[in-house]
């Protein structure tokens, strides 16, 4: 089967009702199946999404919702913080991985940072997310912190990566 061209994926930047619920749903579903994360992880995601929804400012935050044939297949969120931009909720359905879509979204994130005059970004991930970590480091993110966590319904190492554009 021939790979799907990126031009077949629609990327919208407007937050619509149901989007945040779908982000939580897909995180719970995929990370449970792929990494054995449990309900405490889903609660963690829901807490973060609640905070994002309450503080959401379309002038300072951005969401990239990727759709194919009318179905959401992935997303990335840029959440403004006091002195940085946080990259969050970066996930794709398995069938849409490895086609360059992740690279495209990280570039859009960096473009948004520059547009907003932000020079610092950070993200949190886990030690298990090898493909994502490789992508982040390719764009210049550097490991700055590690901590043990039980938020994922199993012991795991969380990692913080930071990026400075200055």
Image (cartoon, rainbow, N blue to C red):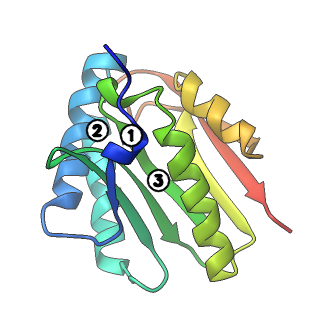
Which residue has dot 2 on it? Answer: 27
In the image, residue 155 lies at what x, y percent? 46, 21
Residue at horizontal 49 percent and vertical 64 percent from the top: 78
Residue at mark 3: 88
Q: Nearer the viewer, mark 3 or mark 1?
A: 1
Q: Residue 161, percent across and down?
A: 68, 45
For marks 1 and 2 on the same chain, the one whose residue lies earlier in the sequence? 2
Task: Kindly tell me whether residue 136 is visible in this rendering.
Answer: yes
Choose between 6 and 107: the one closer to the eye. 6
Q: Marks 1 and 2, how far apart in space?
A: 8 Å
Q: Mark 1 highlights which residue?
A: 91
Q: CA distance from mark 2 to mark 3?
A: 12 Å
Q: Are marks 1 and 2 in contact (CB under 8 Å)?
A: yes
Left or right of 15, for residue 103: right
In the image, which is nearer the foreground, mark 1 or mark 2? 1
Residue 49 location (% of width, % of height): 31, 60
Front residue of 137 and 2: 2
Q: Is residue 20 left or right of residue 113?
A: left
Q: Residue at x 30, y 24 (%)?
A: 95
Compared to residue 8, the image places residue 158 above or below, namely above
Based on the displayed image, in which of its 4 quarters is residue 51 positioned? bottom left
The quadrant the C terminus occupies is bottom right
> Which secondary structure lies at badge 1?
strand
Screen quadrant of the N terminus: top left
Question: Label 3's element?
Answer: strand
Q: Quadrant of residue 165?
A: bottom right
Task: Residue 84: tell me if it is visible.
Answer: no
Query: What element does badge 2 sit on?
Result: helix
Q: How many C-alpha atoms fall within 10 Å of the one at disc 3: few (<14), some, or many (≥20)?
A: some
Q: Badge 2, how many Cα within 10 Å: few under 14, some, many 20+?
A: many
């Amino acid at each position: 089967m021939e790979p799907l061209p990126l031009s077949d994926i629609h990327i919208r930047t407007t937050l619509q009702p149901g989007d945040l619920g779908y982000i939580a749903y897909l995180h719970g579903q995929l990370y449970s199946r792929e990494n054995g994360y449990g309900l405490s992880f889903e609660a963690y995601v829901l807490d973060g999404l609640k905070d994002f929804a309450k503080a959401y400012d379309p002038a300072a935050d951005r969401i990239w919702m990727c759709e194919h044939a009318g179905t959401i297949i992935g997303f990335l969120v840029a959440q403004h913080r006091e002195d940085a931009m946080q990259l969050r909720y970066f996930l794709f359905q398995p069938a849409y991985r490895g086609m360059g879509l992740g690279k495209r979204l990280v570039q859009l994130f960096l473009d948004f940072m520059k547009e907003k005059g932000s020079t610092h970004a950070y993200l949190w991930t886990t030690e298990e997310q090898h493909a994502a970590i490789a992508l982040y480091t390719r764009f210049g993110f550097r490991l700055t912190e590690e901590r043990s966590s039980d938020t994922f319904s199993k012991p795991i190492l969380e990692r913080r990566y930071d990026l400075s554009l200055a």
